[in-house]
Image (spheres, rainbow, N blue to C red):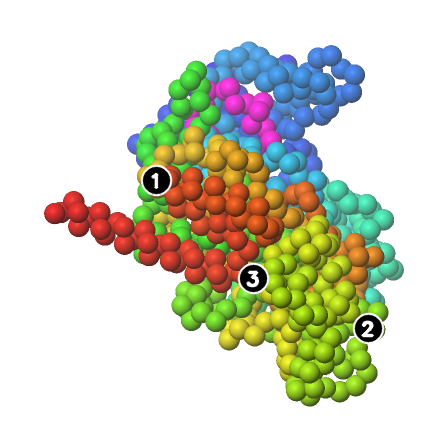
Amino acid sequence: MRCTVDSRSGGPGAAAGALHDDAWPGKPWLARETPAIICFSHLRWKFVYQRPQHLMTRFARSHAVYYVEEPVWVSGACHGWLDETRCDGVIVLTPHLPRDNGVDNHRQLLHDRLREDGVTRPVLWYYTPMSLPYSDQIEASIVVYDCMDELSAFRGAPEELVGLERRLLARADAVFCGGHSLYESKRRLHPNVHAFPSSVDGAHFGQARFIKDIPSDLASIPSPRLGFYGVLDERFDTRLVAEVAALKPDWHFIFVGPVVKIDPAELPQADNIHYLGPRSYEELPSYLAGWDVALMPFALNESTRFISPTKTPEYLAGGCPVVSTPIADVVRAYGDSDVVFIAQGAAAFVEAAAAALQAAEAPECLLEKADRILRGMSWDTSWEEMCKVMNRAHASSSSRRADFAAPPRNGKPASPVRHYDYMIVGAGFAGSVLADRLARGSGKRVIVVDKRPHVGGNAYDHVNEAGLLVHRYGPHIFHTNSVKVMDYLSQFTEWRRYEHRVLAETPKGRVPMPINLTTLERLYGRTFSAEEAEHFLRSIAEPIANVVSSEDFVLSQVGRELYEMFFRGYTRKQWGLDPSQLDRSVAARVPTRLSIDDRYFTDHYQCMPLQGYTRMFERMLDHPNISLALGLDYQEAKTTFTFDGLIYTGPIDEYFGYRYGALPYRSLKFRHEIRDEEWHQPVGVVNYPSENVPYTRVTEYKHLTGQQHARTAITYEYPSAQGDPYYPIPRPENAALFQRYRSLADATPGVHFVGRLATYRYYNMDQVVAQALTTYETITARHAEAQTANVA
């Protein structure tokens, strides 16, 4: 039977669980009006008891709380319905929807259910942006986005998730993040973001310290027992578990929890690995009581980059030492403790587990350290602090969302549009450098928009599911002779020295590229001095009076045999054109050397950002004057924000609506692989010039990053005529077409066109940085001139 709920009354059970007035000085809004809470979640209420359950049950003591689960899709149904249950004072609604017209059906069902209970102006609380289409018509008192995980990084994440999150951020009054790493990634996307990392129900898990009778299925397993409870999904490092179990066959590894989104057959099997299946929240302390050590064997990949595992404080509350892989938030919060041991790789994990077992032999010391860490860490405290943020958000119109305008209603914007000094389109090198300089150097307020959901442009790198740092858009090796560029970037990163070497696959084996003395020796079976090599190359070179094309250039330098071996097939694949159809500048980028120097580049500075490009960009953009709008197209951004100046780093032809036609580009497709071998090739890149091989090169990232790992990651590159624009095609007709767009750009006041795509040039990374720094100097000079003119 349903209960009629007035959103101002506090709902069922309000009298028994109401908050005392002294807990709410001045009777703030949440206590005064007790609005209903409508919570939208991607998690089933009865699946795993975690953050949503802890918070919503606390609200349910004094508020009507509706927990709306993700839909159950019903094939062949004409109309949907809501299943309803009551758990811990929370009304759990499970929509069953037809696959056709599901959004409208869901919206109507929810609207009718809330109207039946007389709910008006509730708090809308979101755990998933995917619920926004069903609820965007509900008039809310405030909107809370409780971002407990980076859902877009999970396996099978819907493509529309990033765009819906941006819409949710536009509407939200307050944003809570389930960990510090997640907070760092979201804090510049909204003006009212707060970190609320994992808390703990200390009384519940503390029972494990006193339980003597452990469950029979656990008691039958010999000691030492090393246990984990939680969901077994793509975050679970199956390879690590298998290797550790093989190294320590006398240790027993216990896993409690459901298997989700991975094939159970993928789970490692051994006599000392035990899968006990799901257990209820109430049962967990009894299993924890039977473990000697608690485990968190998480893979290091995109899905774990921002997690802040609730298990850490729960394990400690139960009196268990913890062994974890180096999850960022675990390292940050517990890395210096003597009760959480952190290790990467099987051998180190075994060593850490041995140290944890030793710590468990001194329980009094262990518990004292655990209690010191857990002091002040509770769901009650987190909930109360969240309520304070919500009260402030409701009381102050200035805490409404300002960085993004909410979707218009009845032709009127629901919240004010924020004005910026500059909008910067593109979060790659050009855009990020100018954002930093304008914010730090000139105190300007800047909004950086990018249609991709990340910063860094094509230089973006990330940790894959094996824990290897890889480049999503192919290898980026930094090299420069510019002290100015090097000094500038060094503000945001430390460096790892790296000299890039490339081998080319030929019929006579792999040889260094660019061509040098070693290349000639391996191809022709004899040694060469510099003078002999120069004479030899001159003897095979073809005299060409007017060197215009790439073919002309190579033939005039090294002759036809080497041209066909190294350049012709590679160029045809890379550009989709014969070298005779391309400007000489394409081939001139790869010189021939009369030495044994096998480095691909000869610049004075050759290095890689120590913690990766993405981390360097994040530091560059970490300034209170810089806001980010990721996953946002420029066409939408320019109707969302107002700004005085525009810096555009996208394709110049796109900016002008392809008025004269599209500028031609070549694109790339990437095939990323993880290999069960320590090394795949002897150098960072191997080129494949033959047209019989569909890809142009294979990159192995560990050479670039210096990472030590039992496995390796490689990327195959396939040139393509379709896809993101990577390489401007250097032909005279294309240059002429660009000049027509350049004339339009020159006649467009208030817009600076910067970077590869905006200037239709194939720049190296350092050249883009230099161009951006020069553009900033131009902007500041013009600004100074304008001020002088105004004074005069």
Q: Quadrant of the N terminus?
A: top right
Query: Label 2 amino acid?
Result: Gly
Query: Label 3 amino acid?
Result: Gly
Task: Kindly indicate whether the residue at mark 1 contacts the one at mark 2 (C-beta within 8 angstroms).
Answer: no
Earlier in the chain: of badge 3 and badge 1, it is: 3
Marker disc for residue 437: none
**Frontmost residue, 312 versus 264:** 264
Q: What is the x, y in percent for residue 738?
A: 51, 45
Earlier in the chain: of badge 2 and badge 1, it is: 2
Residue 759 located left or right of residue 46: left
SS assignment at label 2: strand
Q: Is residue 757 above or below residue 479?
A: above
SS assignment at label 1: loop
Task: Kindly indicate whether the residue at mark 1 contacts the one at mark 3 (C-beta within 8 angstroms).
Answer: no
User: To which residue does mark 2 refer?
Assistant: 509
**Frontmost residue, 58 versus 452:** 452
Earlier in the chain: of badge 3 and badge 2, it is: 2
User: To which residue does mark 1 refer?
Assistant: 749
The answer to whether any part of residue 612 appears in the image is yes
Q: What is the x, y in percent for residue 786?
A: 22, 47
Query: Label 1 amino acid?
Result: Pro
SS assignment at label 3: loop
Gap in angstroms between the C-alphas marked 3 and 1: 37 Å
Mark 2 residue crowding within 10 angstroms, few (<14) / some (14–19) / many (20+) = few
Nearer the observer: mark 3 or 1; the answer is 1
